[in-house]
Amino acid sequence: MLNLVWLIPLVLMLALLAGVLICLFRKGAELAHVPTIVGLSISSAVSLILLFTSQGGVHVAITEGYTWLSLGGMHVPITARLDGIGLIQLNVVTCISLLVAVYARGYMLGDPGYARFFAIISAFVFAMVMLVLVGNLFVLYAFWEGVGLCSYLLIGHWYRRPSAAKAAMKAFLVNRLADCAFLVGILLLWHGIGLVGAENLATVGRLDFDVIFDAVPALAQRQPDLLWWVGLLLLIGAIGKSAQFPFHVWLPDAMEGPTPVSALIHATTMVTAGVYLLARMSPLLLLTPDVLLIAGWLGAITAVLGGLIALFQDDLKRVLAYSTVSQLGLLFLAFGAGVNGELLPLAVVAAMFHLITHAFFKALLFLTAGNVMHAMGDCIDMRKFGGLRKVLPSTHILFLIGALALVGAPPLAGFWSKEGILGLLTLEIGNPQYGSVFAIWLFMGLLSTLLTAIYTFRAYLRTFWGDVKLPAQAGAHPHEATAMMLAPLYILAVGSALIGLVIASTGALAEFVLPIPFLTDPHAHPHAGWWLVIASVGLVMAGATIAYYSISTSGVAAKRSGVPARFAELTSNRFYLDEVFYFCLVAPTQHLSKMVGIFDSQFIDRVIRRGATIPSAIGGRLRTYQTGVLPNYALTMALGIVALVALAFLRG
């Protein structure tokens, strides 16, 4: 049964190869979706079989698939590590990706890059699946980069649009900054493990997860500073992929890609990779509490920052993008709650719980936004349309379900998973060391709940209520999405409504994930107090009320009379963080490049050109002795012979 896991990447690789062949030979492009959907269907089925036949928790199964590299003493096998965390993530990736791919079949129909799109989707999910499955940190990094490459290709799918090309490049470069830190962290960890007695292991074998987790206690005793740097660098890699402050700037611009790409990146694949990395490396992070503290602060800041920026966005997809930034902040906040060590296993469970529910309702929201965009002739500016509940009745209901799940309205999915994170924070408010920090985090978490309710209901009301208003691009008769596009949305809507209740009522997730290998089972699972539940629900209702009164009766124009103009301008311009990035990183790099260019052209090139004239000058001098007159050559030879004889005579 375990070897069945290799069928998942195999079918995805075959789907990728089929897509590449279709692109190369330009035949059967209209059927390019078939290999991808079939591959994802098989992958989802196998993932579910493994989920329901596995015991999870500490029952780790490691199975070797093939040898990636064998060179001298270096042997790099590709092994699959199946435990509770990996199987949960694997099912989220494959099942949600399948629904997105089915939706994309209708959404991308007629696109000139139809075949290329589905080929890259196969590659994207393949890289993410392998990232989740592999049992070695170095091999994980290889597929981590594969996910980044595929995201670049998908965000820039419409590469002829300058905005799409720039967004793809921005996402690629921002992630490279974080990935460089991640790579340095891996190399430091490899070096550190060698210092504590694993120097005889194969080069890459030192980075097997079990080897790492066995070695880090000794490393924490002998090289605590080195381990701290390792944890921090791994965290930087995670916040880059998961778009946390200050690396969040790439994610909203990723909206330039097709809407199914937005759903994939924001719900199931790329942005969840950072969260998965922290969950996977939690036994190491347990010994670096300062790193967890940093993760918690970054998560809290990002949760509030994303919510504030989303308040004054007019682009529906950008509202959802900043919502993703904010919700991922809650996931990192959950890891921060594990700073005292005892709660770290529960923090992992809480983060994975919200990751699951977020995958359902965020995919639903993005795809329903895709329906709006599709009907409005690619217009997504909420100032240009309104009252769409009459035009898109099914999309309206589906979007509402996703919105209610996002804001945490009971009993939908988001309510249960958010309460799990906030409830975790309440446990340590009385802690003498971290109590004040947890209190601040709890306040920021509740503030993000209020902000989420405000911007979500504002987007919902502006889009679907008020008088019917259509942009010119929509044409005379905008219509509801096709049955093929709506079918996967109904499945996502059911998940958004029920998955949280099922997990919370049965406790199945905690039982499956815990105990985490190399971590102590806490044997207690906290529940949010009634005061926290009442406070959260009250904030949701307050947010809905504020949203209602913040828009005009037409549902389009925002009333900002109660908000200071400067603050509104600040949030509308995203706190000018893009400009900060430009002046701190881009501009200095450009100036340095210009200086290097000047040095290259004015010094290096001149030296090389001058050096190139030396052989010519020497040749010119020697050429004067090539007269072509035989007596001169004979005289030269005679003089040479005389000189050689004289030299031989003098030497003895």
Image (cartoon, grey):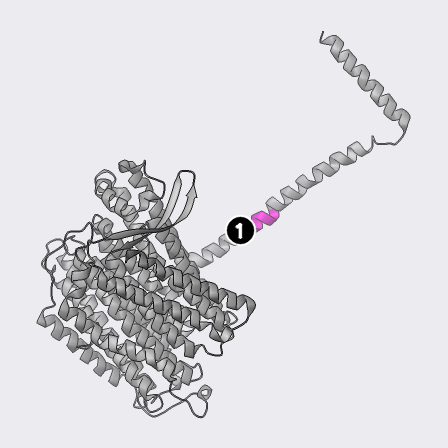
How packed mark 1 is, by other alpha carbons closer than 10 Å (few <14, some 14-19, many 20 or more), is: few
Question: Relative to the observer, which residue lies in front, 4 or 336?
Answer: 4
Q: Is 299 left, or right, of 590 in this rendering? A: left
Question: Relative to the observer, which residue lies in front, 314 or 122?
Answer: 122
Relative to 200, residue 284 above or below = below
Residue that carries the numbered disc 1 in the rendered image: 595
Rendering quarter of residue 261: bottom left
Q: Residue at x 32, y 73 (%)?
A: 363
Q: Residue at x 24, y 59 (%)?
A: 85
**Quadrant including the N terminus:** bottom left
Would you say residue 108 sits in the magenta stretch? no
Would you say residue 601 sits in the magenta stretch? yes
Rendering quarter of residue 407: bottom left
Q: Secondary structure at mark 1?
A: helix
Q: How many marks?
A: 1
The amino acid type found where label 1 is placed reads Met
Relative to 282, residue 558 above or below = below
- Is residue 427 visible from the viewing direction of this image? yes
Predominant SS of the magenta segment = helix
Q: Is 546 left, or right, of 429 in this rendering? A: right
Image coords of residue 235 (percent x, y):
30, 54
The part of the chain drawn in magenta is 594-602
Q: Residue at x 25, y 82 (%)?
A: 547
